[in-house]
């Protein structure tokens, strides 16, 4: 019996990517596409790449009889609706930010609003799949990680988990413009972003507390984190270059062993032998990781690259769905990256 799912925020980039992947998922039926705009229009007319979507899949305002609701909404919106959905017996995978931070005060500080349902934060599972696998079966709320935290945490995770690094961490990350969503603003126009790179959100980017929270959970020590994101002139792709001081006595061999052990057998994370290009993950749920030791400065340099709309959003959400519902983890995500 196929799992009935709804996509709330179906007309955005993340929602469109979810639909693209779910339409080919053998264990899922999309029963509702919800958005504020384009109501009454066929989803395939709104999202021009969804040629295979049925005529019956029309943008509306109701999640129907969905068992699982995917939300891809602006900050604060999913949390307003979540209590009723849970009361109705539905499960939620939030691709937005509403359930990522465990401390309600963090939403006041970093997002500028009072959380609408703070009682649900303790229950939510932070869905960085490779480190959350045991908590996903049966979960009612999964907080899908942000794109920058996904690449950063997968790059640094093995080192934090094996307690190889100290608390001084720097993440320098760069993302394609699709990470901003459907934003009509001069900053995202072709003439502005083409042949240009710029930093933004420094030092108050909303993904900073998310990365810090999960590094502390993995390594047991709150990091002193500096996070600097950049916008680069490409549509998809994200690279996080991470720097962390090594603890005394840690060797390059220990680092290599930690990454090999942590990601042995993982379906979507691969240790590679050289620094990977973002395009090697294009259109796929893969994350490629490469970590080296700078012996002169006693520093770890770890790089993670992803497609920000797949492993950084829709693909990881489906990976989490599969584990929540007892399906093979790779279902619907088997596509290889595009190249060139």
Image: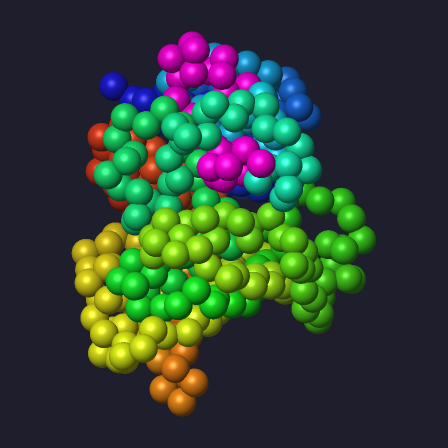
The residue most toward the right is: 186
Tell me if 153 is positioned left or right of 264 in this view: right
Tell me if 58 is positioned left or right of 128 in this view: right
Does the magenta-highlighted stretch encompass residue 99? yes
Q: How is the image coloured?
A: rainbow
Tell me if 49 is positioned left or right of 216 in this view: right
Q: Residue at x 47, y 37 (%)?
A: 102
Tell me if 136 is positioned left or right of 208 in this view: left
Q: Position of residue 105 (x, y in %)?
A: 58, 36
Give the magenta-colored segment's residue range: 81-105
Does the magenta-highlighted stretch encompass residue 339? no
Question: Would you place residue 168 above or below residue 333 in this image?
Answer: below
Residue 188 makes an appearance in the image = yes
Q: Position of residue 80 (x, y in %)?
A: 58, 21
Quarter placement of the N terminus: top left
The residue most toward the bottom is: 296
- Which image quadrant is residue 327 in? top left
Q: Residue at x 19, y 56 (%)?
A: 265
Q: Residue at x 29, y 58 (%)?
A: 161
Q: Position of residue 97 (x, y in %)?
A: 54, 38
Q: Residue at x 65, y 53 (%)?
A: 204
Q: Position of residue 305 (x, y in %)?
A: 44, 63
Question: Would you place residue 158 above or below residue 21 in this image?
Answer: below
- Count of labels in the image: 0
- In the foreground, 144 or 70: 144
Residue 65 makes an appearance in the image = no
């Amino acid at each position: 019996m196929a799992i009935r799912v709804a996509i709330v925020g179906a007309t955005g980039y993340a929602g469109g990517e979810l639909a693209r992947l779910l339409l080919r998922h053998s264990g899922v039926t999309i029963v509702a596409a919800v958005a504020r705009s384009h109501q009454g229009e066929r989803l395939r007319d709104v999202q021009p790449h969804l040629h295979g979507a049925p005529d019956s899949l029309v943008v509306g305002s109701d999640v129907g009889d969905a068992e699982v609701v995917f939300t891809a909404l602006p900050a604060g919106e999913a949390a307003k609706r979540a209590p009723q959905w849970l009361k109705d017996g539905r499960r939620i995978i939030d691709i937005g930010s509403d359930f990522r931070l465990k401390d309600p005060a963090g939403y006041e500080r970093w997002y500028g609003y009072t959380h609408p349902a703070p009682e649900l934060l303790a229950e939510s599972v932070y869905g960085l799949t490779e480190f959350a696998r045991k908590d996903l079966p049966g979960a009612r709320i999964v907080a899908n990680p942000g794109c920058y935290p996904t690449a950063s945490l997968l790059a640094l995770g093995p080192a934090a988990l094996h307690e190889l690094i100290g608390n001084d961490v720097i993440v320098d990350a760069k993302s394609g413009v699709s990470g901003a969503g459907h934003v009509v603003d001069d900053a995202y126009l072709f003439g502005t972003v083409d042949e240009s790179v710029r930093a933004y959100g420094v030092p108050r980017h909303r993904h900073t507390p998310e990365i810090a929270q999960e590094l502390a959970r993995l390594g047991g020590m709150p990091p002193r984190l500096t996070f600097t994101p950049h916008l680069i002139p490409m549509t998809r792709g994200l690279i996080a270059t991470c720097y962390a001081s090594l603890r005394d006595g840690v060797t390059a061999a220990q680092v290599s062993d930690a990454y090999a052990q942590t990601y042995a057998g993982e379906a979507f994370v691969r240790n590679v032998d050289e620094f990977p290009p973002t395009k090697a993950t294009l259109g796929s749920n893969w994350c490629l990781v490469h970590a080296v030791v700078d012996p002169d400065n006693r520093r770890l340099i770890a790089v993670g690259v992803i497609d920000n709309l797949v492993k950084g959003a829709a693909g990881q959400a489906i990976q989490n769905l599969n584990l929540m519902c007892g399906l093979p983890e790779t279902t619907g995500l088997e596509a290889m990256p595009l190249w060139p």
